Amino acid sequence: MNEEIKSILRKNEGLSLVPYHCPAGKVTIGYGHNLTDNGIPIHIAEQLLDYDLKQAQKQLFKNYPSYSEFSENRKNALIDMVFNIGIVSFKKFKNMHRYLEIKDFDMAAAEMLNSKYAVDVPKRAGRNAKIIKNG
């Protein structure tokens, strides 16, 4: 791709790292990428997934370093939860964290299921609670 046209488009479109509505009413991101009509290519979706997973993992272990000692399955369940609800909401699971710290995985799983998270995404929460419980 010609660098000159890329430079022109960068100048004319501007950069937005968050979605916005362009003058035509289309949801747009980046340098004028029309999400409404074009979506994103699969390779970009995969890159976003990799990025978002790394961020969720980083946030989890920064806030709860002892969780890095859990089995891969338990770590993955907790990363999935952070990915889904964000670290701020994840921190609100005080009882679950208390049980995880003492490795009472049965009670930690029960606390996971005793939440708005489990109401909002019951199948996902059920799968993650089962993993926490059984390792």
Image (cartoon, rainbow, N blue to C red):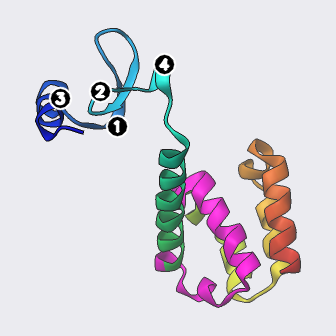
Mark 3 to mark 4: distance in Å? Answer: 19 Å
Give the secondary structure at mark 2. Answer: loop
Position in image of residue 2 (x %, y %): 18, 37
Instruction: Please state which of the two labelled residues, at mark 3 or mark 2, is closer to the viewer.
Output: 3
Would you say the residues marked 3 and 2 are in contact, meaning their CB atoms lie under 8 Å apart?
yes
Q: Is residue 74 left or right of residue 12?
A: right
- Residue bearing mark 4: 37
Q: Which of the marked residues, 1 or 3, is nearer the chain's N terminus?
A: 3
Q: Amino acid at mark 4?
A: Asp
Against 36, residue 86 (above or below) is below
**Which mark sits nearer the N-terminus, 2 or 4?**
2
Q: Which mark is residue 9?
A: 3
Which residue carries the number 2 mark? 32
Residue at x 10% of width, y 35% of height: 4
Report, in whole angstroms, how far the alpha carbon at label 4 lies from the one at label 1. 17 Å
Please report the bounds of the magenta region as a residue range. Answer: 62-88
